[in-house]
Amino acid sequence: MTNNTTTAPAATAELVFADPATLVIDDNVRTDTAIDAAFVASIATGVRQPVYAIRDSEGVVKVRDGQRRTLAAREAGLATIPVYIVDADTVEADDTERTRRRIIDQVITNGDRKGLKGSEEATAVEQLKLTGLSATRIAKELHTSKRKVDAALATATSQTAKDAVDTANLTLEQGMILAGYDDDPDAVDELLEAAAEGRFEHKAAELAETAAARAAIRTQRDELSVQGYASTTTRPSMDQARVLTYYVTADGTSPEPTACTQAHLLAYVRAEWTATCITADGTTVDYDDIDWAVDQDDPESQAEEGWIDPRTITKTDTATATVTWYHTDPDADELQPEWQWRNNNPRRTKPKPDSDQPLSDEDQARKDAESAARKQVIALNKLAVAAQSVRRDALRSALARKTLPKGTSAAVASFQAVTMWRNADLYNLTRQNADAKKIAKDLLGGIDPMEALDTATGERAQVIALAITLAAHEANMPKESWQGGHEYFRSIGEGRTRYLRFLSKVYGYQLADIEQVVTGDLTADAIALT
């Protein structure tokens, strides 16, 4: 009986150290061979994983896997690199088989590679730290930034953050922010929800801006919980409960929370912001006595007579938690509305002055609405400040590039032309915290745009010109922008909308909720407040 099975010849292979300049880069399914400075720096210390190459029938060594390592080694000036060489003739019978094998090898080697998970990277950096290496030394050894090392170390302190960088595909920088809210599960949930929507940076900025209020509310609710009381951060509806001061006891006195059944009480907890203004000599002054119209950037601008110059005071915003008690079952505690008690007991008390009479439902609703409107302005102004911080960080990063985003030159030219035609006054806008020229310099990394243009290439000059226009619009975006444009100048509001939509279209900037109020895509009432 004849055995017709044939056995392929065994591949002849060897591991050698070769001059990268003598190696030929074979055809490759990977067409992007770009290497950056960080990659070259990592290769400069030596190629740790051998490149894979074949030797053809003419003795030419062709790199099949490891072209980027080879190119980086050449750029770093390495004399030799490890190369695993297989003789092609022993495993590839002809050109067709050679091409087929090359493609298969390259797809497999590139497709099977899997980078470290974020949690693994954080743990690795933490372990290096435990060996005694400083964050600066770790950054140097890993050829990365100290900022990233600090982020990894912070992420490593929180299991929640480590899990999230993997499951929610967060960066280590985002993991560091998440780790800072280990004691605030609600904040963690908000951040993860925002991450899924591409709004992580905005939510992080909003949380940072309202951190004091959230902390005050959280502390107050923890204390109430220890005492056995239920609490909420949402004002109860009239169907759910009534404010405790709406009721009186059987003898007509106002009920105290401690005299009521705990199970029937609900504490409505919210934060109140208080502005404290102190002069240089430590005197506390009234906020309304300060001339806030003074241009603090103009030395010649002076406060009106009898008013205080804002440049002479230090303003501090302090958040404190307040509790309003509500009752869910007045009959159980034998309580009744005050007006009802008065009707039932006309002889037991003299009518109180009108100012002491309990408010009607209509008046109480009006009072509550006015109070809510004031709180909304304060809260949304803070969100606008947070959004501005994220937006300007994004602009600084975008304007550091040498060129405009690919394929956007027409959109940029149109945006600049419309701005010059309809909002030319913005270029010279100067007011407190809104000087277009100063903002332009800040967006360009502290470089005066006129000086930058002197040495800029044609494409870089386009970026600088755009920076000047973007700065003009930034000067037109005070924290109150969400309230609308000036009623006599509709173009102001239209300019803000056009600006934000331009950022979204050209740079892929994700608008914050408060910015969507400016564009009209959301209403102010649709934003949940802390």
Image (cartoon, rainbow, N blue to C red):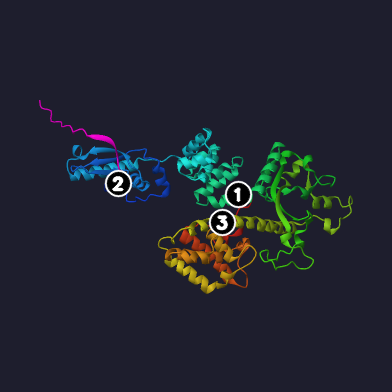
- On the image, the x and y values in percent for residue 519 come to 55, 63
Question: Is residue 23 something one can see in this rendering?
Answer: no
Splitting the image into 4 quarters, where does residue 456 fall? bottom left
Q: Residue at x 61, y 49 (%)?
A: 208
- Residue hosting label 2: 21
- On the image, the x and y values in percent for residue 162 come to 51, 39
Q: Residues within 10 Å of mark 3 (few under 14, many from 20)?
A: many
In the image, what residue type sits under mark 3? Asp
Left or right of 11, for residue 412: right
- Residue hosting label 3: 513
Of pointers 3 and 1, the one earlier in the residue sequence: 1
Q: What residue span does the magenta drawing correspond to?
A: 1-24
Which mark is on residue 497?
Answer: none
Q: Residue at x 56, y 47 (%)?
A: 190
**Quadrant where the image shows the N terminus:** top left
The Cα–Cα distance between marks 1 and 2, rounded to whole angstroms, is: 53 Å
Find out whether residue 12 is within the magenta segment: yes
Q: Nearer the viewer, residue 72 or 261?
A: 72
